[in-house]
Each structure stands twice: as C-alpha cells, then as structure tokens.
Image: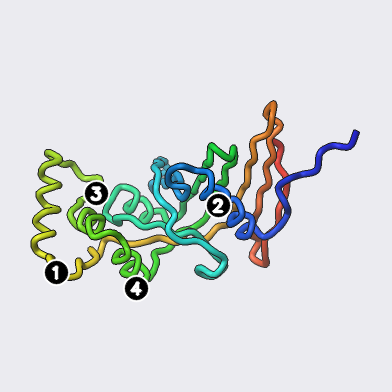
C-alpha cells in the first residue's frame, strides 16, 4: 500500500499561513490571532507570554513579516531592545494545528505605531497610556484612577500615543507548520530562508 501523501504543501509559507489563519478565524471562539511570544535576555534567560498578531504578510519589511504592539518599557520590551530576536507560536487547538516562527525583530516606524494606537478603542488607548507595564502596582484602584485622570485630561481630544508604546516586526528566518494526526503520526514542514528565497523540508514528528 502506498504511504499517504504529505498534506502540508511545499508552497510559499506566507500563502500557507494565510490559509491556516483563515481557517482559525472560522473555528476559534476567541482571539484566533493570539500567539505565544518568546524573548530572551542577553544572558539567554527565556520568557514567554501571549500577545496578539496585528499585521502580517509578504509585503512587510524586506521580505515579509509579523507585527505585534507593546510597551517598550515592559519586561518583554526591554528584552527585545537588548536582544532583538524572538520566536512566535500559534496553537489552534480546534484545528489541531500549530505554526512556529523565528527571526529578528525591528521596531515599526512611528506612523505605523500612531495609526494602530489610534485605531484602538479609546479605553484601550487610555489603559496603555496609564500603565507602567510590568512594574509593581500597589493596588488595582491606583491603575484605574490613573485611567480616569487621563480620561478627564483628554476628554474631547485625541489621546497621544506614549513614546514607549510601539510595535515590532518579526522578519522570519524559519517557519514550521505542524498538523496533528492520529496515533501521533503528525506532519511537520519547515521553511527556511537562505537569502535568495525559501526552501522547505519535511521533519519527523
């Protein structure tokens, strides 16, 4: 009997990502754009947290990429500025699929950060402006009070983007697609950037 053919095609990884992401939008009940972001200190101590993908595609940067936004004064922001490389992980449990992405990071330009910041709900803008992210907080009431103070200060006016609130573009050097199969006979295809284009290979599960 012939073995089953590989179901993960050897195609452009951005096109394949778009196909899987579209399926996730249909099946995931909450935040299909949620992804684990792993960073590390200059001493190689890792940390990971969930963030939201806010832009992606082959036309971003020099060869395409994935964008997220954060407070650059947070723990992850400090790690990114000190060691600008990261790994992303999408896990769509309902689809039994995951995608791993690795590569260097660079800050988006100020106009992109402004545009996205002001596209958010006003309360989200206020929450970001009021937060000293990752720093000690004596009580939740202190934070909420700061939000209300800013709400009163900017009533009827545009809320300025804090200079430390920005976005980062990950330019992938490696993208791996994983598809769960019965009895752990999973499928994995890894795409690697060589400088002249993408190549891919299958990996043992």
The earlier-in-sequence mark between 3 and 4 is: 4
Say above or below: 112 vs 98.
below
- Pointer 1 with pointer 3, Cβ within 8 A: no
Residue 43 seen from this side: yes
User: Of tags 2 and 1, which is closer to the observer?
Assistant: 1
Residue drawn where x is 72% and y is 52% of the image: 9
Residue drawn where x is 63% and y is 42% of the image: 178
The Cα atoms of the two marked residues, 3 and 4, are separated by 22 Å
The residue that mark 1 highlights is 156
SS for dot 4: helix
SS for dot 2: helix
The Cα atoms of the two marked residues, 4 and 1, are separated by 22 Å
Counting other residues with Cα less than 10 Å from the Cα at mark 3, is it few (<14), some (14-19), or many (20 or more)? some
The earlier-in-sequence mark between 4 and 1 is: 4
The residue that mark 3 highlights is 133
The residue that mark 2 highlights is 21
The residue that mark 4 highlights is 111
The Cα atoms of the two marked residues, 1 and 3, are separated by 26 Å
On the rendered structure, is 139 left or right of 26?
A: left
On the rendered structure, is 154 left or right of 43?
A: left
**Numbered-mark total:** 4
Answer with the quarter of the image where residue 162 lies: bottom left
């Amino acid at each position: 009997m012939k073995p089953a053919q590989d179901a993960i095609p050897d195609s452009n990884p951005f096109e394949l990502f778009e196909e899987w992401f579209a399926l996730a939008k249909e099946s995931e009940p909450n935040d299909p754009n949620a992804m684990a972001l792993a960073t590390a200190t200059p001493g190689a101590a890792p940390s990971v947290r969930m963030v939201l993908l806010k832009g992606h595609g082959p036309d971003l940067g020099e060869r395409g990429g994935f964008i997220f936004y954060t407070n650059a004064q947070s723990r992850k922001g400090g790690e990114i500025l000190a060691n600008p490389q990261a790994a992303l992980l999408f896990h769509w449990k309902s689809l039994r699929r995951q995608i791993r992405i690795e590569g260097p990071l660079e800050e988006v330009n100020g106009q992109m950060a402004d545009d996205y910041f002001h596209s958010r709900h006003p309360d989200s803008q206020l929450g970001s402006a009021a937060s000293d992210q990752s720093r000690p907080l004596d009580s939740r009431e202190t934070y909420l009070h700061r939000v209300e103070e800013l709400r009163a200060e900017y009533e009827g006016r545009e809320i300025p983007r804090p200079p430390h609130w920005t976005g980062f573009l990950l330019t992938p050097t490696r993208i791996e697609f994983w598809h769960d199969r019965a009895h752990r006979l999973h499928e994995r295809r890894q795409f690697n950037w060589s400088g002249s284009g993408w190549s891919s290979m299958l990996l043992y599960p």
